[in-house]
Image (cartoon, helix red, strand yellow):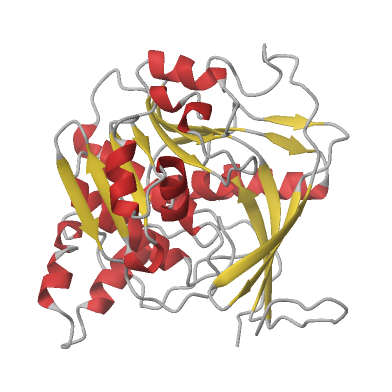
Amino acid sequence: MVVPVQPTVDPLKAARRAGDPACDVYLTGTVFLDIIFTGLDSAPVRGTESWARGMGSSPGGVANMATALARLGLHTSLAAAFGDDHYGEYCWDALEGGEGIDLASSRIVPGWHTPVTVSMAYEGERTMVSHGHEPPPDADAPDGGAPSCPPRARAAVASLTPGVRAPWIAQAARSGTRIFADVGWDDTGRWDLAGLADLGHCEAFLPNAEEAMRYTRTSCPRAAARALTDHVPLAVVTLGAEGAYAVDARTGETADVPAIEVEALDPTGAGDVFVAGFVTGTLAGWPLADRLAFAGLTAALSVQEFGGSLSAPGWAEVGAWWRRVREFDEQDPVALRRYSFLEELLPAASRPWPLRRAVPTIGFRSA
């Protein structure tokens, strides 16, 4: 079932000018069909059968971040391959029809099946098993993959791969697009920043603490963030339950914002939602600490639902959380003031807390 989502806030309204790109953020990557099992008491044990109390499915992979951006009111363009199977059709409809994501740069590949990931969530962690094949080359793309001339956009989010250069990143940067980059685990074990060939085109780099420390050969994530600014203007290191830390080499500004404590159901896609929140705040021109706080808040709200893309919060969820959290007398006034910048952005109250927005193809709420 595809439920159209209409963002109620345009966070970039004050920044929009005549002649601006029609696209706020461009992404490219692989769309998976995610099948998520929740309510597991422990990791599956070899030779046994485990029963999950909850289950759902939704578009995953790069769709997680694309959906998070769109739900925060950014005009989002996605270039991806979709299989011509039922899974691919569902993912296309969910992203284009349900989320309003521009798929003009995407393609449907006849005879190619949609990649699938099974994610098992337990004890606040997840274990994933994926299956898929590379799509056949795109005859319309010179390198056979992502368009070499991506649409003009305010920003793009790139997932860097060690030892691999993506020509579209340099092309986008030359056209004035601001590049925000994350990175996955380095399976080579080298952890060499020189291997991230496109990092020099990026405005911001957002690794997690373990990745940042390995790349910089440091034992402290905050020291790692500072070291990364020798290679990229803005370094943001996520610290898990401790929040996030950022250093802007251009201004000398730093920010250290604690995480929001929530009861996590499924952490799938939380990192993508964090990046989407940070990109939104950056394009809106917010102070660095506000950007970190907003990114952490959106990520925290996302883990209270299962699935990566369909758990991404929109402004209705953010507004409901803000109204709810102020109802408790024991709240720390200083902590509340950290999020007071949201007041002028949030829509009028319309839905009670807690909200249940994610609508998977199959799903039962975990008991």
Q: Position of residue 22 (x, y in %)?
A: 39, 26
Residue 11 makes an appearance in the image? no
Which corner quadrant holds the C terminus? bottom right
Image-based side of 294 in relation to 126, left or right:
left
Pick whichever, 116 or 357, lies toward us.
116
**Within the image, what quadrant is residue 50 found in?**
bottom right
Q: How many marks?
A: 0
Residue 221 makes an appearance in the image? yes
Question: From the viewer's perspective, is residue 28 above or below residue 73?
Answer: above
Which corner quadrant holds the N terminus? bottom right
Residue drawn at 34 percent across, 29 percent down = 231
Residue drawn at 50 percent across, 24 percent down = 197
Q: Position of residue 263 (x, y in %)?
A: 44, 79
Q: Position of residue 127 (x, y in %)?
A: 66, 65
Image-based side of 5 in relation to 190, left or right:
left
Pick whichever, 204 or 282, lies toward us.
204
Image-based side of 331 in relation to 265, left or right:
left
Q: Position of residue 32 (x, y in %)?
A: 69, 48
Image-based side of 297 in relation to 124, left or right:
left
Residue drawn at 12 percent across, 67 percent down = 337
